[in-house]
Amino acid sequence: MNHSPERITLRQPDDWHLHLRDGDMLNVTVMNTARVFRRAVVMPNLTVPITTVEAAVSYRKRILDSTPVGMAFTPLMTAYITSNLCPEVLEKGFRNGVFIAAKLYPANSTTNSAQGVSDLRSIDSLLETMESIGMPLLIHGEVVDRDVDVFDREVVFIERHLVPLLVRFPRLKVVLEHITTEQAVEFVDTSSSKIAATITPHHLHINRNAMFDGGLRSDFFCLPVAKRERHRLALRKAATSGKACFFLGTDSAPHLRAFKESSCGCAGIFNSPYALESYAEVFEQEGALDRLEAFASEYGPVFYGLPLNEQSVTLIKQNQVVPDFVEVLRNEQTSEKLVPFHAGETLRWTLLMGPNK
Ligand code: DOR
Ligand code: ZN
């Protein structure tokens, strides 16, 4: 990595946690990710979740068909774990190179998670297979019990479910996705090298006040929900620590503006259009620009056992104003809007278009 006060060139990064959606949305989501990321781990929580190898292959094709000509992008597919899923499906998909990992959503914890898992013990046979073949388990780490405060969901999940699960499966590779608390940082930091965590740009930038700044601000609502300032500071410290157990995963999760603004607004922040620029700002503020490359482009592939990317990307120190909306074309006549993270703000770094050869 090469950086001066005015310019950073780094190995091309990957996004280790991403929602691309499907249908009309794909043209926008894929382009906004492929502009900078070489690979991405694609979440399986479509309206009809990805629970078979065939469904993953067909979804991967739709993603590749939506990738702009001239952009090299590899979607890494995941399986959606249900209590009915057979270990053989996971094993076949993993061995064939279709599934890179499987995703665990506690039932009703977030978008399209109704078919997720209510009783973790019901998937022990899946976890046993995954542990034995080295297939990573990606976890949405929140309990959904009504008597647990929304802001405590992650911490309670770790204590009640993750710790016992790792006692049962000590060799299982686990990514605790989109961590939001100092307790999650501490847990991952002090666990074995088989346990890692992704950290999103939004959890590095905002605390829970952002959701209530002058009114109810649904653009800042995501799950796990942003927490107190002290947790944001712990996440910034972890991301910029240079520790290999913390790496980039945007959790970019677009929902059309109308769905975000309804009386029961959807959880998710669409951050991919300026994701690397957003992370760069945090690393610069923390005086850690020299650690951005490892976080964005090295620790993820090392954890997953994949080669590092060969190409590089360059950010220059140039202000840019983030637009209020990104359009999704429905057909020739109509379009709908997505609100990108940082809408209306000025970011200090700008990506020079396209990866360098
Ligand atoms: O905010 C979120 N949005 N968190 C998730 O876990 C899922 C995601 C989505 O798919 O909308
Ligand atoms: Zn997600």
Image (spheres, rainbow, N blue to C red):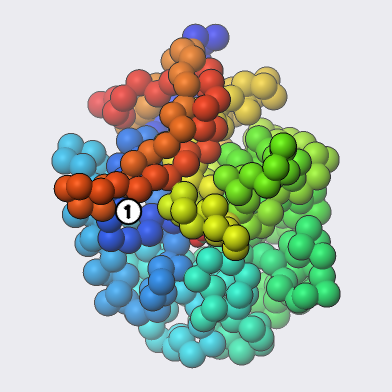
Q: Is residue 354 left or right of residue 315?
A: left
- Asked whether 72 or 241 is in front, the reply is 72
* Dot 1 beta carbon under 8 Å from ligand 1: no
Could you tell me which residue is drawn at 66 percent across and 86 percent down?
Answer: 119
Identity of the amino acid at label 1? Met
Residue 167, image quadrant: bottom right
On screen, residue 11 above or below 220: above
Could you tell me which residue is drawn at 47 percent across and 21 percent down?
Answer: 321
Could you tell me which residue is drawn at 25 percent across and 42 percent down?
Answer: 72
The x and y percentages for residue 326 are 38, 38
The x and y percentages for residue 270 are 48, 45
Find numbered disc 1 in the image and state the secondary structure of the residue it sits on: helix
Q: Is residue 336 left or right of residue 119?
A: left
Residue 289, image quadrant: top right
Name the residue beneath numbered marker 1. Answer: 25
Q: Quick one: quadrant of the C terminus?
A: top left
- Residue 120 in sight here: yes
